[in-house]
Amino acid sequence: MDQENKYVIFIVDDDPLFSQALEQYLKERFPGVSVERFVTGEAGIHALDRKLHMVILDYRLDSEFPGAWDGLKVMHKINAISPETCVIILSSQEKIQTALQFIREGAYEYLVKDEQAFPAIQRIVSELLPGEEDETENDKEEAGNSMYRIIGVLVLLILISLLITG
């Protein structure tokens, strides 16, 4: 897949350790995907000049940069500039009102930063990444074919044993 056609994911989070861990997690599971990290929403917005598919966006972005835009403002800007971009909110904020506000205002999904966050992101990327579902269907078809082969071998063994003992 050439650079121009790569699936592109931005991670916008002011926690460098967390965003680096998420970047590594995504790159290991989706080697053909381009992942870029930004510590502020403003920096991510400035990079929207290329084709972008998904943004994983923190809600609070001002711990390192006081006065930085929060995730809601960044999401509004992304939706205005690139409405086809999928925005996933990933935050330690657990208030249901906050999650509902983001969903109402255009977030694809709101995830809490906990032990289930990375697998949930993997599931979402798998759902949205072109060709990922095709591989899953191929895996299911291959498993079905393997089952038929096993049944065929068992039937053949039974027939041979009946002929030998018969």
Image (spheres, grey):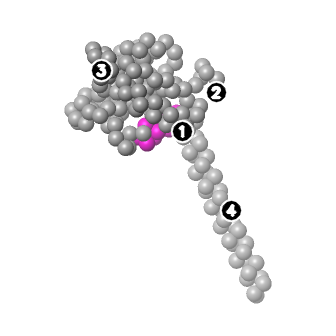
Residues packed near mark 2 inside 10 Å, few (<14), some (14 to 19) or many (20 plus): few
> Could you tell me the amino acid type at mark 4?
Arg
> Could you tell me the amino acid type at mark 2?
Met
SS class, disc 4: helix
Q: How far is disc 1 from disc 2 in space, using C-alphas?
A: 16 Å
Q: How far is disc 3 from disc 1 in space, using C-alphas?
A: 30 Å
- Which of the two discs, 4 and 2, sits closer to the camera? 2
Residue 121 drawn above or below residue 105:
below
Q: Which mark is residue 1?
A: 2
SS class, disc 3: loop
Image quarter in which the N terminus is found: top right
Q: Position of residue 50 (x, y in %)?
A: 52, 15
Residue 83 showing in the rendered view: no
- Which of the two discs, 1 and 4, sits closer to the camera? 1
Q: Which mark is residue 62?
A: 3
SS class, disc 1: helix
Q: Position of residue 83 (x, y in %)?
A: 41, 19
Q: Which mark is residue 149?
A: 4
Q: How far is disc 4 from disc 3 in space, using C-alphas?
A: 58 Å
Check if residue 127 falls in the magenta segment.
yes
Residue 76 in which image quadrant? top left
Q: Earlier in the sequence, mark 3 or mark 1?
A: 1
Residue at 61 percent across and 56 percent down: it is: 144
Q: Earlier in the sequence, mark 4 or mark 2?
A: 2
Q: How far is disc 3 from disc 2 in space, using C-alphas?
A: 36 Å
Residues packed near mark 1 inside 10 Å, few (<14), some (14 to 19) or many (20 plus): few
> What residue sits right under mark 1 in the picture?
29
> Could you tell me the amino acid type at mark 3?
Asp
> Could you tell me the amino acid type at mark 1?
Arg
Q: How far is disc 4 from disc 2 in space, using C-alphas?
A: 34 Å
| 110 vs 28, nearest the viewer | 28
Which stretch did the figure color magenta?
119-129
